[in-house]
Amino acid sequence: MFADDLMVWGEKEVQEQPQEWNGEVKACGYMAKCEVKMSYGVQNLQPKTVANVTVSMKILANIVHSGFIVEGDMVLPVEAAIELMAKFTDVLEPPNQLLANCLDIVTYLWMDYRDEMYFKLDVIKFLPHVNSLDISPISCINGKFHCGGSLGPIVVVQEFSSTEYPLLKSFLQFVQVLLEFDPETVAKFEKSGNDYSDKLKYTIEKNFKLLLPAMSYILFEVFPTYNNWRYKKNEDHSFISRSCLSIFHKLISINTKKDIIDYLNPGEILHLMCFYNLLEGGAILPLLKIVGTGNGMLQLLMESQLNWDTGPGVDFINLVRLALALLNMTLRLKTTKDMNYLCPLEAKIMYYPNDKNHLRILHSTVDYIYHTFNPNLPTLAVELMRSFAMDFHVSLITCLGVDPEILRHCFIRHLESSEEPTHLKVAIFNFLNACVLKQSGLAEMLINIECPTEIPRDFPNPQITSGKQGGCLLYACELLANLEECPNIAYGSVYNVVMKLLHTLWLHRKELALKFLRRSDNFWINFCSPLLQNPFANVAQRMHEISAKLASVAYSDPMFSSS
């Protein structure tokens, strides 16, 4: 009866009856504690009692999550929730939904009652925990330390068999809250600076005793194997994927300035723990499987939705976006750490298309460039392609499994369209610049300039390459031609990357591209027009670099002296 009344109360609006709810919150906590105390023991709890307590904790979680302010240093619902978690720690098959509701209450009140709950959780040892932080940084990074706690066995024994994962989902949500900034952290860094990485390091240092075993459990137990589990609801699989990637993305974004492993702070330890697991550990395959989903699957999911704004298609697109960004950050971090060896992550990506175990990561990444539902996904795909071009010591043409001419036509369509976002055009020119530096074969296909000197004289009428001569450079010439009518173009990000590309072409003596540019109508007039204006510092600096290179090349190469 009491639980039925609570169900009715929980359906009311939060703002309407804050005074009455204060009593109801206390009543829920008192009822939950009394139900357990009146039983002969937690092993002998009646199903009806468990159901009543579960409903009570669920209502409490919803009330607290709605923004209800509970006064007092240690509120009764938190006491009831943590006491229930402690009572079921050693039970063989505890009610996992009840424990999930209790953990949700702790999560929602963590920001306001952090110190009290931190102490209670450390005492009951329900979550993954370590007895001491006296662990070497290298052991932390490799996950070679003992973790205790009741949560892991409960997930294995009960949730695996039931194919539902309420407790694991609540735990992942709690870990994400541990990485959020509490009011004390925000106030501290408003005065000394608002650097995101420093705030995150400070937050991790405060919660390190909870975060270290939690990340060990997620990185080594959950993420490498969750694709092999059975699921009653596909939403559970998506939630676990999204939560893990969100946590990894936050930790990867931490700046690490120290190279001495023994002097790392807690934030840097978790950063390297996540980084090396993504680069060489069990997180590689699950991450690449998400990246390799393909645009065709996203298209099918979007078409099956009843609503364009919400549904499995939108959720999966956001998941793929997160995976592309995480993979790109991991590869870029590898280059900054001077790791010149072929890591397992790169080896998995660089399979040739005819390999039976090939995940088709390169092909799927190129396929995302044609995506139309989310404008950010093609940009992330092109940025990842740039990382592939810069970091991989193989020819991308042989690994793509797609005709480069199709890729060129797609790029030209994006560049010429007025509907495409600026960040996509910037990403395309950055990718082209990387190809000029590292992937000359792919760069020639994208620029698409015929080389008459390479054609044998036995063929007086050679076959012309399909498509317009100049490829992506045509858009660069068009952009420069519009400078006279729209001088503000010189202050935009697209102009900066175009000038960077021209600088790279001159610096590396790409004669075919330079001859094409010199023969274009009014190229030199358009190229030098910003010098006749009053440019910003970045435009002047880029023009100065190109002018200096032009002068040095003109003196040493007769090809340029005539111009």
Image (cartoon, rainbow, N blue to C red):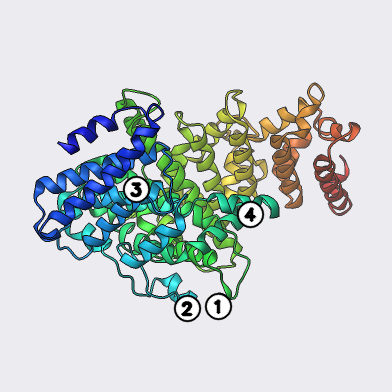
Q: CA distance from mark 3 to mark 4?
A: 27 Å
Q: CA distance from mark 1 to mark 3?
A: 37 Å
On the question of residue 185 being in view, the answer is: yes
Quadrant of image for the N terminus: top left
In the image, residue 395 above or below residue 531: below
* Precedes in sequence: disc 2 or disc 1: 2
Helix or strand or loop: what does disc 2 sit on? loop
Question: Is 559 left, or right, of 273 in this rendering?
Answer: right
Helix or strand or loop: what does disc 1 sit on? helix
Helix or strand or loop: what does disc 4 sit on? helix
In the image, residue 202 above or below residue 313: below
Residue under numbered circle 2 = 136
On the question of residue 288 being in view, the answer is: no
Residues tagged 1 and 4 counted as in contact (Cβ below 8 A)? no
In the image, residue 178 above or below residue 208: above
Residue under numbered circle 3 = 105
